[in-house]
Amino acid sequence: GSGKSSLAEHLSTGLESQQPFYAIAGCPMFEEPLHLLPRHLRSEFEKMLGVTFDKGADLCPICRFRLKDEFGGKYEDVPVELVSYSKRNRRGIAVVPPVDPNNQDTAVLIGSEDLSKLDRFSERDPRVLDLNGALNVGNRGLVEFVEVFKNETEYLHAIITATQEKVIPAPGRHGMIYVDTVIVAHSNEAEWNKFKGDHTNEAILDRIVVVKVPYNLRLSEEVKIYQKIIRSADFGGVHFAPHTLEVASMFAILSRLEPTAKCDLMTKLKIYNGEEVVEKGKTKKVDVVELREDTKREGMEGISTRFVQKAIDNALSDSGSGRCVNPITIREALIAMVKEADLSDDRRKGYLTLLQDTVHKEYQEMLEREITRAYVHAYEEQAEDLFQRYLDHAEAFINKTKVKDRSTKEELSPDEGFLKSIEEQMAIIGTATEGFRQDVISNLWVQIRRGEKVSYRSFE
């Protein structure tokens, strides 16, 4: 659920968008036409054409037979065609799904012999070959192994020579065949660890380049994932209340984060999301790079996107009319799923704490902010008057001057009681108040110098 298959899909799509490539006409492996050139002439052709030949490059048995039998060795007469990459038509892109352990036929990888032709040709005749395996049709392109380690190790032996020597065994008694392909395999971490722990797999392990694909750790991006799934699922007029997907996403990401001494998990989530975290009127200074450097396996464990999607489905089913999901129902659905999930006691307890405490408190703060905004917008004029009055008194306090009353024109000392009554609503108290007032005034002076209009929305 972290996007491994999607990454492989993007690679295939990228290949399909490329320009067509030249191949020997009729070759089942879409072979490079320059392989037709005799080995003893290749160094001369390299100088003439300004290209470099792979020293092990050779024709497949079928093209070698055709060159000799059909064209009498005249390589310049062999036709060449343009071929476009196509996953659907298995041209330069092949996909290998996991195979039943009791029926792992290597023909899926390297092709087979056409038994119907054995009555006409001998076993050693290349014309009996049916080179339609994944490593054959993926030549000059990409071969994707889906959930690769669900297969038996013996089934993967063809990968060893394909990656190192660029050759694979031909079906029957036809030696080795040259291949030039990129092998992309993906697997869940548990199966990879099991495979890696077996020292008898060393030959394959040495040829693997590991690319870790962790879960997403950015809240805004996680919300987009569920929005995309919901759009594609076509729930048919279902209403998702404000912050519903945000609450679900918040739980998913909190479960993936590693604790740190520098801040709590919710603060870490917000910093990763590019938000400024204000505490007691001051921006909390935590370096996001340092946070990431302190982690070892962040994003490699936690709640998957599929888990959250099931919770959304359950919340829809439990909503009675099935037409509305809100943050409360999604949280209850997640709690129920965590209680039923096959988890260790410690992990279950940790997830429930996140849902019932951390996420719950954050949602309450969201509600407070929303209600405050709704109240302020309903009393726009009063809000603006209140804000301007706060500015007058804050500026006078910082500059140690008097405030001129807007109605009576009387000069008064700054009203600290009034200032504090505003600031206490934002948990700005004690020594933090002076710094906060300076921040407000300096920020607004910058806006005035830029010619921007100053209103109560200027310093949210």
Image: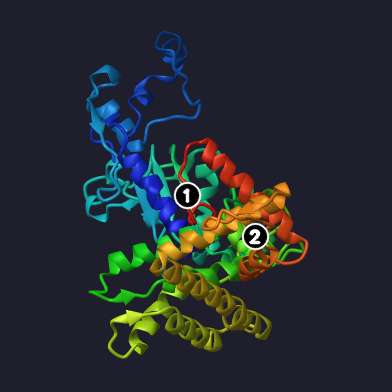
Please state which of residues 244 and 393 is positioned toward the viewer in this rendering.
393
Residue 124 appears left or right of 215:
left
Residue 297 screen position, x and y as percent: 66, 61
Looking at the picture, the colour scheme in use is: rainbow
Q: Which residue is mark 1?
A: 184
Cα distance in 3D space between marks 1 and 2: 45 Å
Q: Which residue is mark 2?
A: 278
Say which element carries label 1: strand
The amino acid on which the numbered mark 2 sits, given as a three-letter code, is: Val
At which x and y percent is residue 401?
A: 70, 49
Q: Is residue 218 visible?
A: no
Amino acid type shown at disc 1: Val
Residue 399: % across, % down: 71, 47
Give the residue drawn at x 64%, y 66%. 418
Q: Which image quadrant is residue 86 in?
A: top left
Q: Secondary structure at mark 2?
A: strand
Q: Is residue 291 left or right of residue 340?
A: right
Query: Which of the two labelled residues, at mark 1 and mark 2, occupies the earlier sequence position?
Result: 1
Residue 220 is at least partly visible in this image: yes
Q: How many marks?
A: 2
Of tags 1 and 2, which is closer to the observer? 2
Front residue (pair 45, 119): 45
Observer-nearest of 398 and 252: 398
Q: Few, some or many C-alpha atoms within 10 Å of disc 2 (few <14, some 14-19, many ≥20)?
A: few
